[in-house]
Image (cartoon, grey):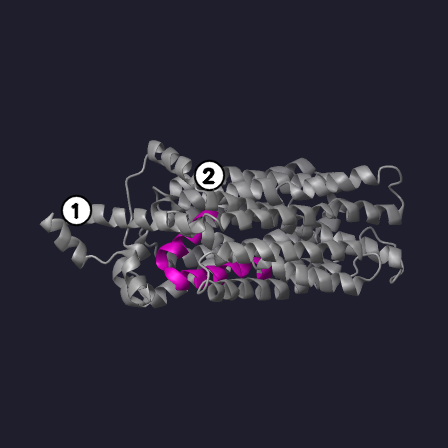
Amino acid sequence: MAFLENSTKNTPLPSDDVEKGADPQEQDLPPRTGISHTCAIIILVILFYINLVTYMATSIGAAILPYLQVSLKIDESRIGLINIVFTGSYVLFTLVYGFLGDCCSRKCIMCVGMAIWSVTEFCSSFTPDENFTQFLIIKGLTGAAVASYSTLAPSIIADLFVGDKRSRMLYIYNLAVPIGSGLGYIIGSTVTSALGGNWHWTVRICPALGILGVLLMIFLVKEPSRGAAEGNNSKSFSLKTWLSDVKLISKNRSFMFSTLGTTALNFTAGAIDICIPELLLRARKILQETAPCQTDVCDYHDSMIFGIVTVVAGIIGIVAGVEIAKRVKKYNPRADPLVCGFSLLGSAIFLFLAFYLANISLVATYVLIFIGEILLMMNFSISSDICLCVVSPARRTTAQAMFMILSNLLGDAISPLIIGGISNLTKRQNPDSARLSFHSLQYALLACPFVVTLGGGCFLLASFYIEKDCEKAEMEDEDCVLEEVIVTSP
């Protein structure tokens, strides 16, 4: 017992610095991780860049959908099938990468995955006209490859930073979501239009940027040990211990409720990304603000405008969400899920009004979508931070995998398919009617505010359990540090 007392006195626990009011990142991070603060920032910038490129690629695909429909001869239901194949393979491989990431080199897995992603994304641009099956197969491979990066990158950031600094770095990393998505819409619409509808060259932009990201990871990214920022919680891994971790995480109520809330968020975000530009195009035809075009694809620059709205709203939303939660947390430790819950409930109101007024005023619709997206984006970084904080570092990669599987498989993987299916059923009576075509998509999208409301309720439920779950995770961290002191000390 004397040895244990002396050892623990010389080994700071993760909570010690916080209790003394010190910043753990500034005081103890370099010796714990073996990575300087400057190097950690460089790693964050590289991870942000790659995240930006992957979201750009996804939004470019959404922006060129009208051209793909003409080239591949597909309808709205098949557009949803593209998304479900991509996201389905993405979430299935997420669990694999979650297991491998807890026992193998995360850097190697990400480098190989992103290299394969770049190759398959490039190959998709060579799909012959009307060969929809080949395009689907390549998209499935692309989703499986990019999952390696999306699953593992947040856990590396969590192992480099701690406390408030981790929250700030995660929201910087998550800024790539709206910026990349918005740039994808802008690039996809403008470049494809400039090339006379040739979408193939537009798709080849992101694979080239992806290869650059792989090279940056190989030469500049150094992987921290698991749980390094808190004091190194590494452990031996096996299938048995991994299954045990999955079972424990499944019993974590704040984690599960937050994941369900994020699922509702992703469902709505996926539907908005795919369907809003098309809704605005159909609204223009009803309002007759522009004469109907005579080409296969009518381009009224709605994808570009929507891209700009997404970039600005995303930056404002993510920064505002983190800063508001940070300030509220000084008075209420349940601030994170409460901010997520109330922002989703507010978003549901503005999105409902945006969809309802789309055939009355496009200006009002854009303003309401802008506000609704700000409130949606407030959740992106906070929800990720919640799911990383309520589990111990030794289980973070597995928890991240579970978080992504549930929130994507039941969220943005199926929402375009469901919305497209409802829209097709509604307009089946008269598919050539411009007014019926608009209202069919409008009524289908009205499901999103309802789903968002349910998501807000899930976050509010998570607020009842988050304090207890955070304390439990911190206790597990301290136990792991004590075990390592006993095992490794002479």
Coordinates of residue 393 in the picture (x, y in percent) = 35, 49
Q: Main secondary structure of the magenta part?
A: helix
Looking at the rendered structure, the secondary structure element under dot 1 is helix
Q: Nearer the viewer, mark 1 or mark 2?
A: 1
Determine whether 139 is above or below 278 in the image.
Answer: above
Query: Which comes sooner in the sequence, label 1 or label 2?
Result: 2
Q: Quadrant of residue 104?
A: top left
In the image as oriented, which residue stretches furthest toward the top? 240
Determine whether 301 is above or below 256 in the image.
Answer: below
Mark 1 nearby-residue class (10 Å; few <14, some 14–19, many ≥20): few
Residue at the spot of label 2: 95
| Residue span colored magenta | 151-179
Is residue 175 within the magenta segment? yes
Amino acid carrying label 2: it is Leu
Q: Is residue 106 visible?
A: yes
Q: Quadrant of residue 123?
A: top right
Residue at the spot of label 1: 486
Looking at the rendered structure, the secondary structure element under dot 2 is helix
**Residue at 88 percent of width and 37 percent of height:** 429
Q: CA distance from mark 1 to mark 2?
A: 33 Å
**Residue at 40 percent of width and 47 percent of height:** 469
